[in-house]
Amino acid sequence: MYDEPIYYQDNMLRIKTLQHMKIREPLQRKWHYHRELEFLYIQEGVLQIRVQERVFTLEPGDVLLIGASQPHVTWSVLSEKVVYLILHFDMHAYSDPSVMLYYRTFYEIDGPLSRYNDWFQTDPQLKSDIGDAITCIHREMESRRRGYEIAIDLHVKRLLLTIVRSEQNNMENWNEPPSAYNLHPVFDYVDKHLSGKIEMETISKMTNMSYHYFSKYFKKIIGVSFVEYVNMQRVRKAERLLLTESVNITEIAEKVGISNMTHFYELFKRYNRCSPKEYIQRLTP
């Protein structure tokens, strides 16, 4: 089992997209996985992909979603050649407050993302919308026109929105998730105070909830504890600072509100599977 490194075409967007072609010949089947979500969009030919125990036969117009760290392998090429788009992106880079409200979906707390592959086969409009978003992202990355970063971010969010809304159309006994309107001021407060101390007691008072009720409410809505959410946002900010500012790692840790360097390294490695120094080396051309 191979932990495949994904080399991003844009380090800030944490994304890679390319057009790939395979011809019908004996394949060296190599199981692999990666932390990035992966989408495939078939443009020509027929391809079989095995994702864990399932084999998917993909024809022109078909799409496939492979979850983070989900083992998969190219199983066979059933036509003379197959041409398809591959899209990899790190969900962590797109976990802003609006997306965090759907953390439970994208981080597979309520179920595996692989369930969407069955919906793609039965919902032509959903499949078409996903394929169009993948195509637009690939086109923007290839052209690199002024503003492509904004365009790609919008298309990724469009792709995520399509996924979220498809749940309501394809799940039986759909229940609208509980409202999270009280959490928007919380997200804003956390974002503005990452460099300092963030007390959950202060946050709970902002939402007119008791300390313990807020703690349970936040985890129920988001899928992770409030402390875990704050840690994620601190690491996200540290990632940006590492790539955009010429300061040492100690200063960056202080700027994201972590004075204990051992704790900073532990958190950073938890989310990136590497040290801050290795992160810079990996993402800096």
Image (cartoon, grey):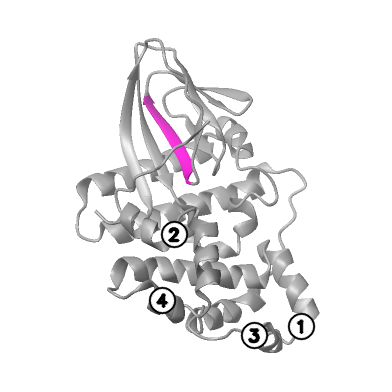
Q: Which residue is mark 4?
A: 250
* Mark 3 closeness class: few <14, some 14–19, many ≥20 residues within 10 Å: few
CA gap between label 1 and label 2 equals 34 Å
Return the x and y of residue 193 as percentages of the image width and height: 51, 84
Mark 3 and mark 1 lie on one chain; the one further toward the N terminus is 3
CA gap between label 3 and label 4 equals 23 Å
Secondary structure, mark 1, is helix
Q: Which residue is mark 1?
A: 211
Circles 4 and 2 in contact, beta carbons < 8 Å: no
Mark 2 and mark 3 lie on one chain; the one further toward the N terminus is 3
User: In the image, which residues are magenta?
Assistant: 36-43
The amino acid type of the residue labelled 1 equals: Tyr
CA gap between label 4 and label 2 equals 13 Å
CA gap between label 4 and label 1 equals 32 Å
CA gap between label 2 and label 3 equals 27 Å
Front residue of 34/87: it is 34
Q: Main secondary structure of the magenta part?
A: strand
